[in-house]
Image (cartoon, rainbow, N blue to C red):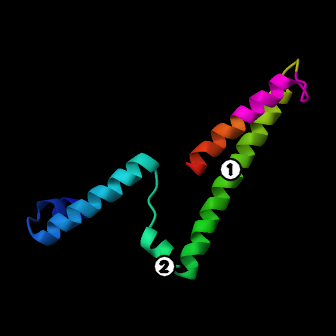
């Protein structure tokens, strides 16, 4: 509702809001999240950092669970050998694909 009103207002403040809203929405659609960079640069509040750390921990933990499930599934195959070059390449590729979006 706020966006609809902001896009109907033709004042300089409305134009400023539309630019801001478009930037935030574009970032959200591309990255899947938004972050208050200014608050982050200015050290924000303690709760802000705790919240970010909790979110990062949750993401990392779910990634760890996924990786463990993948390992269990791979280990159930008949010809699984954890020391084979093929298995090592497979897990290296999976690990890199999981880490790439995080460090992009």
Q: Residue furthest bottom?
A: 45
Q: Of 82 and 1, which appears nearest the observer?
A: 82
The image quadrant that residue 89 belongs to is top right
Q: Is 13 part of what is drawn in magenta? A: no
The image quadrant that residue 22 belongs to is bottom left
- Eyeballing the image, is 22 above or below 96? below
- Eyeballing the image, is 92 above or below 87? below
* Of the image marks 2 and 1, the number of the one nearer the N terminus: 2
Q: Is 89 part of what is drawn in magenta? A: yes
Residue under the image location 15 percent in, 67 percent down: 14
Task: Considering the whole magenta stretch, tell me its main secondary structure.
Answer: helix
Q: Position of residue 55 (x, y in %)?
A: 60, 62
Q: Position of residue 59 (x, y in %)?
A: 63, 54
Which residues make up the magenta segment? Answer: 80-93
Q: Position of residue 4 (x, y in %)?
A: 19, 59
Q: Please give left or right for residue 88 compared with residue 15 in the image.
A: right
| Residue assigned mark 2 | 42
Q: Secondary structure at mark 1?
A: helix
| Residue assigned mark 1 | 62
Q: Nearer the viewer, mark 2 or mark 1?
A: 2
- Numbered-mark total: 2
Q: Would residue 27 be seen by someone viewing this image from the given angle?
A: yes
State which quarter of the image contains the N terminus.
bottom left
Q: Of 101 and 46, which appears nearest the observer?
A: 101
Q: Residues within 10 Å of mark 1 (few under 14, many from 20)?
A: few
Q: Would residue 1 be seen by someone viewing this image from the given angle?
A: no
Q: Position of residue 53 (x, y in %)?
A: 63, 67
The image's mark for residue 5 is none
């Amino acid at each position: 509702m706020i966006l609809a009103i902001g896009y109907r207002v033709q004042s300089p403040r409305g134009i400023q809001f539309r630019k801001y809203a478009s930037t935030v929405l574009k970032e959200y659609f591309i990255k899947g999240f938004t972050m208050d960079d200014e608050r982050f640069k200015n050290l924000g509040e303690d709760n802000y950092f705790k919240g970010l750390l909790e979110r990062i921990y949750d993401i990392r933990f779910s990634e760890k669970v996924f990786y463990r499930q993948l390992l269990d599934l791979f280990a159930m195959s008949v010809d699984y050998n954890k020391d084979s070059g093929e298995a090592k390449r497979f897990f290296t590729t999976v690990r890199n694909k999981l880490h790439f979006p995080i460090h992009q």
